[in-house]
Amino acid sequence: MENLKKELTHMGYKKWEAEKFFEENEDEIKDTIYDRDDSDPLKDIIRNSSKIPVRIELLSNYDCINSHWLESSRGYSYEESYFGDMVDALNLNPSQVKEILLQYGEKAIGRFPDKKSRNGKEQVCYQQFYEELINSCCGANLLTYIATIDIRDLYKSDFNLSEIYIPKGNKCGLYSSMQGGGKRAIETFDFFLSLDGSKCYSQKRVKE
């Protein structure tokens, strides 16, 4: 409105004349502005918003993974366990996971099949994966990725993304949202995290 008043004064009207005109025709002027306004406030907000930091947790039929002390006391098991689902989610070769566990004197029970097709396609390195396990001290942990989501992509997908890009050097690891523990110190390689339903993930915004 103020800009329109300035336009009138630039056209030769006195300031008081412009003020009087707007006072007498305020409703009609506002209606005309609204009728001609084709802006989309939601799209404007989205366009000017920064990326959203999120925490993506792997959900499983097997609840969670316990602390290293508890898991190692009875032995790590690939079959029918959250640990096994975590190995699969990270696209690790179970036989190589067993190899590094035994290398450091850990107990591994049951089958750890050799899935050679995963070699060279792992999301993380085996050494950092093992270090994350032994540093786990909370009683209930979930495999957790840290990522950022472009709100424009989220809006375009009707808030139902099918995948999230996880860049090289991003962090993932074991985290307990209930107990607030976990390092999430594993550095990832480049990959797309599929959210198509083949694995179940929970997405939560990280408070800044």
Image: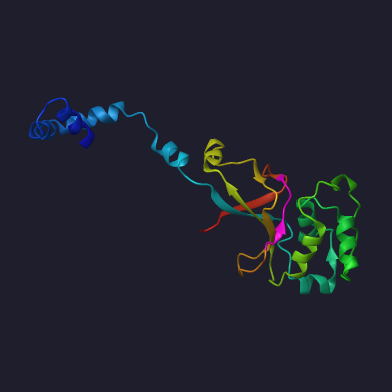
The magenta stretch spans residue 22: no
Which percent across, then down, holds residue 43? 44, 36
Q: Quadrant of residue 192?
A: top right
Write the residue at 90% across / 66% down.
103
Is residue 106 depicted above or below 97 in this figure?
Answer: below
Q: Quadrant of residue 117?
A: top right
The magenta stretch spans residue 190: yes
Magenta stretch: give its range. Answer: 184-191
**Image-based side of 106 in relation to 132, left or right:** right
Split into 4 quadrants, where in the image is the N terminus?
top left
Coloration mode: rainbow
Write the residue at 21% across / 37% down.
2
Whether residue 1 is visible, yes or no, is no
**Image-based side of 50 in relation to 180, left or right:** left
Which percent across, then down, holds residue 111? 91, 59
Tell me which secondary structure the magenta stretch mostly adopts: loop
Write the residue at 83% across / 66% down.
76
Which percent across, then down, holds residue 180? 60, 68
**Image-based side of 55 in relation to 27, left or right:** right
Nearest the viewer among 97 and 187 is 187
